[in-house]
Image (spheres, grey):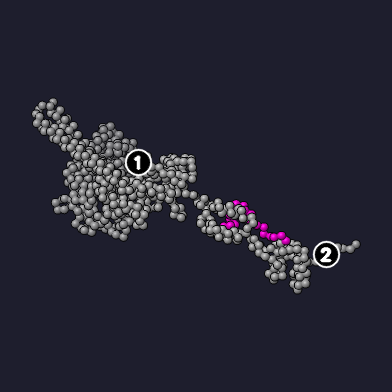
Amino acid sequence: MNGEHKITTSHRRRVALVYLRQSTLMQVREHTESTLRQYALRDTAVALGWSTTDIEVIDTDLGVSGASTRGREGYRHLMTRLCLGEVGAVFGLEISRLGRSNADLARLAELARLTDTLLIDADGVYDLSDFNDRLLLGLKSTMASAELHIMAGRLQAAKRAAAERGELRTPLPVGYIYDDEGAQVIDPDEEVQGAIRDVFAAFAQTGSAFGVMTTFTGRRFPLRAFGGAWAGQLRWGPLTHARASSVLKNPAYAGVYVFGRYTSRTKVDPDGTVHAHTVRLPREKWPIVIPDHHPGYITWADYLAIEAKLAANTTNAGARPPREGLALCQGIIYCGSCGRAMGTRYHQNGAGAYECLSRRQAEHTRTCRSIQAAAVDAAVACALLDAVTPAQIAVALDAAGEITDRRHRSIRAAELAAERARYDADRAERAFHAAEPDNRLVARSLENRWEAKLAALADADAALTAARDTLPPPPDQDTLRTLAADLPGLWHAETTSDRDRKRLLRTLISDVTLLPGTDWDTATIGIRWHTGATDQIRLTRPPNAAATRKTPADVLALIRKLGPTTSNDDLVALLAARGLTTGEGQPYDLTAIRWVRWTYKIPCPPAYHDGERSVTEVAADLRCNPGSVYYYINRGSLAARRGAGNRLCIPWSPQIKADFVHLINTSGRLEARLPQPVAAPTA
């Protein structure tokens, strides 16, 4: 082997690493001879003087691409051992096995130079401390990188050429198969066809991918397996949100052949790790689009409508689709003070309210406010129903007819422009081919003219495609007139869901704005229609919860007038007779009267008439226990009545006191007798 003299005893004392790699698992499975040759490098290491116990084989990177170090655990292990200075030589079948990247190989070569490690392949031994070996290894690294680029370019060019003809065979989405002639056709399995068609029908009904998934709850959905042991088999399972979205977003179901919907993007982490991820390109950046390539489940117009609907449902991109709640203007109402969207908040009783979201972020202005949803929704619904009248529909249809005619004229103009550009390009091509090849001055000018005409043709075709991809024309006039005549009934029907009302509202109204104001008892809302017209509606704000529960003014005035002289029972009877209720519409009871007295500091009438005492006062006057007083009251020996607050009111006078004292002293109850006054001592 070339350069065998570079191997020293110092190298043989350390470990020899045999690194194996093949780019794909298919190569590992099909190209077994290459794998055997790489494993045979172990024998080469033995022949060069390494002991079998000092040779390690790293084969964990079999089936992993060498374009980068991502996912190559074996390469990382090799670099770790190399940095520790434990490796005397690294064996590879060829230098490209270690990596196809110049940066990776340069890093490996530098570490090998610093740790005095040899790199050995089928061509010889490389000592990285030798300038000539380092130069030769760098040249091989550049050639390996160029080889990768050339091979990838050839493969991608061949794939693109086949895709431009619509002949590149790729795994088909479920619902399609290749026939015996290689053409893409609808799967003849009727159950598969029904499942795919039901997905689009469910989306037309629900308007969201989650709605489609909910519709398929408890129902299986097909999946065609590609690769592996189940290649070509039809598998069944639940319809997840990801699978529903992939079906709805796939243009193949519209009969369109598309190549290049996805591309790979590279991202570098702060620690230097390189990640590649796949991103979906927008429709205008798809490189190859062939309409009417195969039978479709839906039309191209249906696909564009689905695409627009899914984009409107993407909340993380700023969309605010209609939800199931009662709030009619959810998602389209904005704060006129700060310009932010207003969120919807529901209370425990189910009532909704619109609240400026800037309050949660401590960025609200002094005029940012919230408002009950019912007040705004009623005003907006009335404006909508007033606008959709037969007369207004007639005006709108006339305008729509003009727009449709204008659209047809623009499409026709784009078709004529494309036809003119195609004629000019064909004419420039004929002129180029008719020129003498030897006259390069003329041929070069004709070639430049031909390229310019081809570029103009491409622009004209793109303009024609954009004109045809606009929204479809509105429905016929009879359908709209019938809808306008029955719209109020349809709006108030019990079968119309809140989400359907929101969708109907959004067909005409672009957004609603709660305009700023200083009067907190009123509110002004602005309505912007899709036509660009605007309206302003001034409405009275509904009272808040505290104002709703507040005692009505007329009731409070009556209680203030009669309260000091009228008992609570009499007030309850009086208010009930007059039909007066609380702020919440409930009849007044003793608890409500007491609350009003306590809140507004309205005094109660005196509990005792002149000459009456309480039980406590009588017991103090007699110097006895209040229980004795209650005893004689319960026996009827002492007169008493129930006064305000259910208090006992005892008529009391010197004569009544004397009679009561005599009654107690002559009774047989020793414990009830009153204590006699102590006589003064004699001198």
User: Which quarter of the rendered picture does the C terminus lie within?
Assistant: bottom right
Q: Nearer the viewer, residue 436 or 199?
A: 199
Q: Which residues are magenta?
A: 591-611
x and y percent of residue 7 in the render? 28, 39
Q: Nearer the viewer, residue 557 or 121?
A: 557
**Residue for point 12% across, 33% down:** 427
**Residue for point 33% across, 36% down:** 114
**Circle number at residue 133:** none
**Residue for point 72% across, 64% down:** 651
How many angstroms separate mark 2 from mark 1 (CA)?
102 Å
Specify whether residue 638 is painted magenta.
no
Q: Is residue 420 visible?
A: yes
Looking at the rendered structure, the kind of residue marked 2 is Val
Looking at the rendered structure, the kind of residue marked 1 is Ala
In screen coordinates, is 551 left or right of 213? Answer: right
x and y percent of residue 526 in the render? 40, 42
**Circle number at residue 678:** 2
In this rendering, the label closer to the viewer, 2 or 1: 1
Query: Which quadrant would residue 88 be assigned to in this image?
Result: top left
Q: Nearer the viewer, residue 394 or 507?
A: 394
Q: Secondary structure at mark 1?
A: loop
x and y percent of residue 192 in the render? 23, 57
Q: Secondary structure at mark 2?
A: loop
Q: Which residue is mark 1?
A: 533
Q: What is the total number of numbered labels drawn onto the structure image?
A: 2
